[in-house]
Image (cartoon, rainbow, N blue to C red):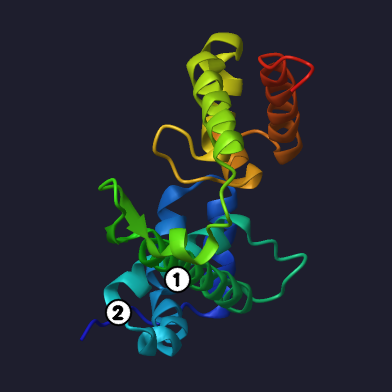
């Protein structure tokens, strides 16, 4: 069983928070090490979710690091109270993301083949409406046309945002907020890039379509 360092006293905590705010990286490490017991305490309530305890501690530690980096003593009196919320939020986000991925895998996993030998997933059976063959062929043609020309008319940043947003090139679709974090820009700026890119892509199709 892992052993953790004892929590800091209130005076010690204030001292190291001040040192960290002044740019001392060692103070940050001390704050993390002495609050790992709190991570373990919060993570314990999720151990019945079939998750590896070490994974829970690792994810919870990310929440602790975020808490220490963003803690404002003027808004919250105790670091432990604020950190517990951040740790809990990080664990919840991880569990929700894994649950979502597990649903996607189960829905998309092949369960057989059709008459032409194409793989069929559970999602195909659940959600497939009656197909208009002519409309389906037209849509496929439009998609291929779009994919052939998308990189030619978009800037590199627009191309990256569109690929991330709509899951192109084998990626999982991502939210504007996730893309904004990756590119270190605001979500509203990502929204503008996406809007401009889509406007450009509309020019690929004739007006009568």
Foreground pick, 107 / 41: 107
Q: Position of residue 108 (x, y in %)?
A: 38, 58
| SS for dot 1 | helix
| Label 2 Cα crowd, 10 Å radius (few <14 / some 14-19 / many 20+) | some
| SS for dot 2 | helix
Question: Mark 1 to mark 2: distance in Å?
Answer: 17 Å
Q: Position of residue 202 (x, y in %)?
A: 71, 20
Say which mark, if any, is on residue 53: 2
* Residue located beneath label 1 in the image: 99
Q: Is residue 151 left or right of residue 186?
A: left
Q: Nearer the viewer, mark 1 or mark 2?
A: 1
Q: Position of residue 72 (x, y in %)?
A: 69, 61
Foreground pick, 2 / 167: 167
Q: Quadrant of the N terminus?
A: bottom left
Q: Residue furthest left?
A: 1
- Determine the image quadrant of residue 51: bottom left
Q: Is residue 32 left or right of residue 173?
A: left
Q: Quadrant of the C terminus?
A: top right
Q: Is residue 177 above or below residue 203?
A: below
Foreground pick, 177 / 3: 177
Say which mark, if any, is on residue 40: none
Question: Could you tell me which residue is drawn at 68 percent across and 33 percent down?
Answer: 190
Q: In the rendered image, is residue 64 in sight?
A: no
Disc tally is: 2
Question: Could you tell me which residue is drawn at 50 percent across and 66 percent down?
Answer: 126
Question: Could you tell me which residue is drawn at 70 percent across and 37 percent down?
Answer: 186
Q: Position of residue 166 (x, y in %)?
A: 56, 39
Q: Is residue 48 above or below residue 2?
A: below
Q: Residue furthest top?
A: 152
Q: In the rendered image, is residue 180 in sight?
A: yes
Question: Could you tell me which residue is drawn at 40 percent across and 65 percent down?
Answer: 122
Among numbered discs 1 and 2, the one appearing first in the sequence? 2
């Amino acid at each position: 069983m892992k052993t953790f360092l004892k929590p800091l006293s209130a005076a010690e905590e204030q001292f190291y928070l001040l040192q960290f705010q002044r740019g001392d990286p060692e103070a940050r490490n001390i704050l993390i090490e002495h609050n790992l017991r709190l991570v373990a305490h919060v993570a314990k309530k999720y151990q019945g979710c079939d998750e590896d305890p070490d994974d829970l501690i690792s994810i919870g530690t990310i929440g602790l690091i975020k808490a220490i980096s963003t803690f404002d003593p003027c808004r919250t009196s105790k670091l432990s109270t604020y950190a517990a919320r951040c740790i809990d939020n990080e664990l919840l986000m991880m569990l929700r993301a894994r649950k979502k991925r597990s649903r996607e895998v189960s829905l998309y996993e092949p369960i057989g083949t059709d008459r032409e030998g194409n793989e069929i997933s559970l999602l195909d059976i659940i959600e497939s409406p009656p197909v208009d063959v002519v409309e389906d062929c037209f849509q496929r043609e439009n998609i291929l046309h779009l994919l052939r020309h998308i990189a030619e008319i978009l800037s590199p940043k627009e191309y990256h945002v569109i690929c991330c947003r709509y899951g192109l090139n084998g990626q999982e679709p991502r939210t504007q907020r996730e893309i904004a974090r990756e590119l270190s820009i605001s979500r509203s700026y990502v929204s503008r890039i996406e809007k401009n890119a889509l406007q450009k892509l509309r020019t690929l199709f004739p007006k009568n379509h």
